[in-house]
């Protein structure tokens, strides 16, 4: 065994740059280990570092574990006791001494440890018999790559969604088809977030799908889903929460992109590096608002500048990981991810992408020039004046960034790998790279983009965008899986992966992996266009099921992971408010532009100005999330303030009055009640509902009172 050990060491000597006499020194070190060092480590160190516990993530049970070090970095440098942290600790030269809480080891024992390290710190066997080295979380293995989300897309042979669902249905069948009136209302609310007109049943469903996908309201509806994922807001957050008056251009970009059916890979590329793709295209520049939409403190002290900068880059990287890859990359900031194969080294390699990327306001002139924003103020309104240009907030490099503090520049020229995520413990400079589990380091050059000479950009973000959309060698397969899962989620109420922001080992596994890969493959084969995937889903038998309950199905599949029934789901806050405005006849359908925080606004809710410290109260009551981090799914709660808003708010009363005014054209009470049901629920009232409505009106209640009751019903705020 010793001869084999020497051969292995000798064979790696040149690569490891070992001392020329390393073989002799290792042989001598082995004798030291067997004679004295092993017993010293077992007696004084093992209890806390690999025996009963593992303090500071430092395990010395095996040599591999010893050399890996712990949360304070490398503890032992073979052949260099003076450069080994462990010697400073046993000599009590540091605050954290070893052995912990015990007297310092005798000098003779310390000298033996030093000599052993200088001789390579070899082991003849583990300190605990039979103990194998722990898997190094900093090394990504082929086994790690076997997790389903990291695999290439499977080539699934199928003709339809329904075929794949029924294949895994365990003998169950779909629920009966929903009535057309139910499907039409479901479709309008799904694709536009607005209730259908009374005559919407006249069109066949496939044609209606096409019509609604082509409507401007589709982009407004689905942009709101993406803005949740992008943690979009128009203020900085924290105590001061200053406004970002030009951030709304990003929201408008998302609406336009979805309405135009921009290929999803381009949608992603522009959000990461639109300025590096088309630096004179206002929409490409507006798209980069994705990176800058997060929180950022505006008043910091000098010793917080560097930490705050790393926080800002972390926000960009973590949101990219959550939104586009369904991975919690940010967990590796302080230590190797304990669940997914994302080492700290990978985190900082990706973080360096954003080294010089900053949030900034630019002026886009009519002639296509882009310049740093030069602010002049309106003396009366104390607002910026922009002449002959469109001002927008973007994230880029090379212009004058928004500097919100006076303690130094907005970025540092280098990004370092930090021990435990602390800027006080820099290890080495980080250079750009990507997740090993989704790529091979030797492929980096295939993605690398070098900007033309004289460019203001580094090219790193465009390089990232190449990797993240590369289906064959990069992260493109996962990118496609994540977005088609989000489409499915918002059509059915839950995704094929129920945790849309977490495709890793802490998420919920995919319930229909073949279907997910089939949809992802269709997306890619179709040029990354999203609307064809919408059509596939909406024209499926699965989506057109009724919500009829079946006790046997629910017992066999309580979570409906097989999708053998359409489960009713409550509308989001914005769709509830927009639907009330629509049926009242008072909805202002103006698209785009600056938002407002006036709850009396008649525009769609997506045009509310989102100030982090002053969220719209009526929307918060219906589970509008705080835009601090990426939100993959909203909760659905039932709380008293929801009913109180519908019954008591002046806005709800105004909408009820508007609906009542629309009913006047229907003539008598029966006609008015029938029209109210058609507008609110897209159906006629039953005989019992008609009698109850007539009795309510005869009791002295006003038509507005009756309309407010209808707007408060579950049927109005739920998709059946």
Image (tube, helix red, strand yellow):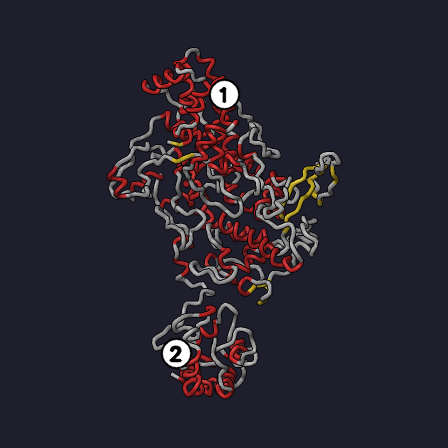
**Considering the numbered disc 1 on the image, is that residue within a helix, a strand or a loop?**
helix
Task: Answer with the quarter of the image where residue 246 lies.
Answer: top right
Foreground residue among 311 and 319:
311
Foreground residue among 523 and 427:
427
Percent position of residue 573, x then y: 47, 35
Residue at the spot 48% in from the left edge and 37% down from the top edge: 621
Q: Is residue 442 visible?
A: no
Q: Residue furthest front?
A: 700
**Considering the numbered disc 2 on the image, is that residue within a helix, a strand or a loop?**
loop
Foreground residue among 547 and 24:
547
Q: CA distance from mark 2 to mark 1?
A: 80 Å
Q: Is residue 114 visible?
A: yes
Q: Split into 4 quadrants, where in the image is the N terminus? A: bottom left
Q: Earlier in the sequence, mark 2 or mark 1?
A: 2
Specify whether 604 is left or right of 188: right
Tag 2: Cα neighbours inside 10 Å, few (<14), some, or many (≥20)? some
Tag 1: Cα neighbours inside 10 Å, few (<14), some, or many (≥20)? many
Q: Which mark is residue 127?
A: 2
Q: Which mark is residue 568?
A: none
Q: Residue furthest top?
A: 667
Percent position of residue 530, x then y: 47, 39
Residue at the spot 59% in from the left edge and 44% down from the top edge: 289
Percent position of residue 549, x then y: 29, 35
The relative height of residue 448 versus residue 84 in the rendered view (above or below) is above
Percent position of residue 601, x then y: 57, 29
Task: Answer with the quarter of the image where residue 676 lies.
Answer: top left
Residue at mark 1? 657
């Amino acid at each position: 065994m010793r001869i084999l050990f020497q051969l292995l060491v000798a064979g790696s000597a040149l690569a490891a740059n070992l001392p020329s006499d390393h073989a002799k020194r290792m042989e001598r070190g082995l004798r030291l280990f067997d004679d004295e060092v092993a017993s010293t480590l077992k007696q004084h160190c093992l209890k806390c570092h690999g025996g009963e516990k593992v303090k500071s993530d430092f395990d010395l049970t095996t040599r591999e574990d010893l050399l890996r070090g712990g949360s304070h970095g490398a503890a032992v440098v073979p052949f260099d006791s003076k450069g080994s942290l462990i010697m400073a600790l046993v000599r009590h030269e540091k605050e954290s001494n070893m052995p912990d809480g015990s007297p310092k080891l005798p000098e003779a024992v310390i000298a033996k440890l030093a000599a052993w390290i200088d001789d390579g710190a070899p082991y003849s066997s583990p300190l605990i018999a039979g103990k194998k080295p722990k898997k190094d979380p900093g090394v990504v293995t082929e086994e790690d790559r076997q997790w389903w989300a990291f695999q290439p897309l499977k080539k699934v042979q199928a003709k339809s969604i329904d075929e794949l669902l029924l294949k895994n249905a365990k003998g169950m069948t779909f629920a009966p088809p929903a009535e057309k009136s139910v499907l039409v209302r479901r479709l309008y609310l799904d694709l536009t977030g607005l209730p259908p007109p009374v005559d919407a049943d006249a069109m066949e469903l496939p044609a209606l799908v096409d019509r609604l996908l082509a409507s401007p309201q589709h982009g407004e509806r689905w942009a709101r889903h993406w803005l949740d994922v992008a943690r979009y807001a128009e203020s900085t957050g924290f105590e001061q929460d200053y406004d970002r008056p030009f951030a709304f251009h990003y929201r408008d970009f998302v609406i336009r992109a979805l309405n135009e059916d921009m290929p999803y890979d381009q949608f992603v590329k522009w959000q990461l590096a639109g300025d590096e793709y088309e630096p004179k295209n206002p929409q490409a520049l507006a798209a980069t608002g994705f990176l800058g939409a997060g929180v950022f403190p505006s008043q910091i002290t000098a010793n917080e500048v560097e930490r705050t900068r790393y926080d800002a880059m972390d926000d960009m990287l973590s949101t990219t990981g959550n939104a586009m890859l369904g991975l919690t990359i940010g967990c590796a900031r302080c230590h190797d991810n304990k669940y997914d194969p994302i080492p700290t080294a990978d985190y900082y390699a990706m973080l360096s992408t954003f080294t010089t990327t900053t949030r900034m306001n630019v002026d886009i002139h009519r002639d296509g020039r882009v310049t740093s924003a030069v602010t002049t103020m309106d003396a009366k309104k104390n607002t910026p004046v922009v002449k002959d240009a469109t001002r927008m907030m973007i994230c880029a490099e090379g212009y004058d960034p928004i500097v919100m503090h006076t303690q130094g520049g907005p970025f540092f020229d280098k990004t370092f790998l930090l021990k435990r995520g602390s800027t006080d413990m820099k290890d080495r400079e980080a250079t750009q790279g990507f997740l090993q589990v989704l790529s091979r380091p030797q492929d980096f050059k295939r993605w690398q983009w070098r900007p033309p000479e004289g460019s203001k950009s580094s090219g790193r973000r465009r390089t990232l965008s190449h990797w993240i959309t590369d289906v064959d060698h990069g992260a493109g397969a996962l990118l496609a899986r994540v977005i088609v899962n989000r489409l499915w989620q918002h059509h059915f109420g839950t995704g094929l992966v129920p945790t849309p922001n977490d495709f890793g080992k802490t998420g919920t596994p995919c319930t229909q992996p073949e279907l997910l890969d089939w949809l992802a493959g269709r997306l890619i084969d179709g040029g990354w266009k999203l609307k064809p995937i919408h059509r596939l889903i909406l024209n499926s038998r699965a989506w057109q099921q009724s919500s009829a309950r079946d006790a046997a199905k629910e017992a066999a599949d309580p979570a409906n992971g097989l999708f053998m029934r359409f489960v009713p789901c409550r509308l989001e806050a914005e769709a509830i408010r927009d639907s009330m405005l629509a049926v009242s006849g008072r909805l202002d359908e103006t698209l785009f532009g600056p938002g407002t925080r006036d709850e009396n606004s008649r525009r769609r809710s997506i045009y509310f100005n989102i100030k982090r410290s002053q969220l719209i109260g009526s929307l918060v009551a219906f589970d509008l999330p705080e835009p601090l981090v990426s939100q993959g799914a909203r909760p659905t709660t039932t709380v008293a303030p929801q009913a109180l808003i519908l019954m008591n708010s002046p806005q709800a009363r105004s909408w009820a009055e508007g609906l009542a005014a629309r009913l006047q054209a229907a003539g008598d009470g029966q006609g008015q009640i029938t029209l109210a049901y058609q507008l609110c629920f897209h159906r006629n009232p039953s005989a019992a509902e008609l009698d109850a409505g007539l009795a309510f009106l005869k009791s002295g209640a006003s038509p507005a009172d009756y309309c407010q009751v209808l707007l408060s019903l579950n049927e109005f705020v739920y998709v059946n």
